[in-house]
Image (spheres, rainbow, N blue to C red):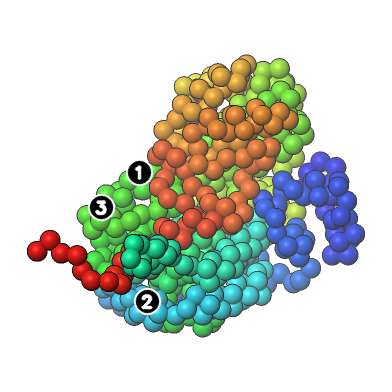
Amino acid sequence: MLEHGWTEPKSPSEFSSRRGSKFSVRHLKMALLSSLRTQGLFGALYYTGTRSISSGSLHITDSLNFWSGGRVGLKDVKTKSEPVYEPATGRVLCQLQACGAADVDAAVRSASAAFTVWSKLAGMERARVMLEAARLIEKRREEIAEIEVINNGKSITEARLDVDSARLCIEYFAGQATTLSGQHVQLPGGSFAYTRWEPLGVCVGIGAWNYPFQIAAWKSAPAIACGNSMVFKPSPVTPVTAVLLAEIYSQAGAPEGLFNVVQGGQETGSLLCHHPSVAKISFTGSVPTGKKIMEMASRGVKPVTLELGGKSPLIIFEDSDLENAVRGALMANFLSQGQVCSNGTRVFVQSSILPQFLTEVVRRTKAIRIGDPLLDETRMGALVSKPHLDKVLGYVKQAKKEGARVLCGGEPFIPEDPKLKDGYYMTPCVLDGCTDDMTCVREEIFGPVMSVLSFDTEEEVLRRANDSDLGLAAGVFTKDVKRAHRVIENLQAGSCFINNYNVTPVEVPFGGYKASGIGRENGQVTIEFYSQLKTVVVEMGDVDSLF
């Protein structure tokens, strides 16, 4: 079951016959994040092919570094390798060795060489390579999604949608590559000026572990569309799928070194940020790390894009469609096991409808199917690591100490399948009786924990919703159109939703206010964050000189 009252189709033909009805579209709307093509919609829910891997079956021995057009094995490694774990089973997936200064320099030099060639191509030529990369991603969709699940622990349904988002992002920016143009300004006497957008050079992308493949695409697509090259460092927790994107770009006809992958943690990231040949840094991750990257970039006066943390409010007014509001709250808290920066984890519910809301949200939360993330019927997989699982469970314990009531969940979970007994699972949690000063309300938990707070008036909830140093996202559910726009106008957040939540089409910008970041990802405006503007003044007459 996806939602109460809607059963999954048994075949593509059944899906096709049902998708036109108001009922089926309504029930799919919240579950599928954003509008994708019909084939993508069905494919995310129901896979008709043969599964090539299963949880606990994959062991990776190939190098995960990629530059100069191929995978690169590290030589003269001085650092100790670190194990990478499969979240679903808790077993070691591979050993990861961090790139040192020589490796980072080799990757940057490879990117610099590619930039020399790539930046001179016409937008149409760049678009042709990008569209081919998107086609290859679509062709390998299930393979990439399966490896993402092994790598990250999220459900296969969500992983497919992540791969779709990556593909759509590359397709979108392929289109943008053909439209890059400046401005013509007529000046007196027949003289004129014009502007041109030019690429920056070698860009660095540093990814997070919650959307490994998608983030690699979200950062690389606008960068290369503008004529830049990129060196990408995945999270050391989820290092596996970024190299697949590197291979796909190469197979699509990109010059060697256009998109490179270096593995490692904080030290490798620092080497990238300080490298003199790096022109820009784009980072997704925590606020403390984002501040450090901003500081390092400032020494070279390098521009940064920072997509950081959130503690976002979701406001549900008494006139809301309660069914949709409950769905929205579930989507705002439990996608990817709650490990989403934009999640609306502070759920403000008007006091007159609080009992009904809690009854329904608890019922549906208890019904979420937890287990093997590679099974189509699973709706919640494993958290990304054992330390992170312990951290999230610790927040639930702290919430109880501070007076919150656990209405459901918040406990370790052991699936029935014995091969999953050491995986990092927990039951999704709903907390009631929360107050604004509680730790669970103030700090980003980054797990499947929903904190519910009551409110009485619009003025009150706006003041409380904005009482945070973070401002990544916000949402409001109401049938009052005037109120919806009025509330959104006064919410201090960069990505806002009305009567929906966590919908991220690649055509629109995504990013935050306040400490949640700088710059935007996706949408046409992102071109400005991967380009620099040159002004050219052309004199058509004689020079007027004071000397």
453 relative to 443, above or below: above
Mark 2 surroundings: few (<14), some (14-19) or many (≥20) residues within 10 A: many
Estimate the x, y position of residue 515 in percent, counting from the top left: 40, 39
Q: Marks 1 and 2: CB-CB under 8 Å?
A: no
37 relative to 416, above or below: below
505 relative to 260, above or below: above
Question: Is residue 187 visible from the viewing direction of this image?
Answer: yes
Mark 1 surroundings: few (<14), some (14-19) or many (≥20) residues within 10 A: few
Residue that mark 2 sits on: 115
The mark found on residue 288 in the picture is 1
What residue is shown at x 67% (from left), y 68% (from top)?
142
Q: Secondary structure at mark 2?
A: helix
Q: Secondary structure at mark 3?
A: helix
Mark 3 surroundings: few (<14), some (14-19) or many (≥20) residues within 10 A: some
Mark 1 or mark 3, earlier in chain: 1
Closest to the observer, 500 or 326: 500
Please identify the quarter of the rendering in which residue 198 is found: bottom left
Tag 3: residue type?
Ser
Closest to the observer, 161 or 302: 302
Estimate the x, y position of residue 211 in percent, counting from the top left: 54, 56
Q: How many marks?
A: 3
Closest to the observer, 185 or 110: 185
Q: Secondary structure at mark 1?
A: helix
Residue that mark 3 sits on: 298
What residue is shown at x 84% (from left), y 49% (from top)?
24
Tag 1: residue type?
Pro
What residue is shown at x 50% (from left), y 22% (from top)?
463
Mark 3 or mark 2, earlier in chain: 2
Question: Is residue 260 visible from the viewing direction of this image?
Answer: no
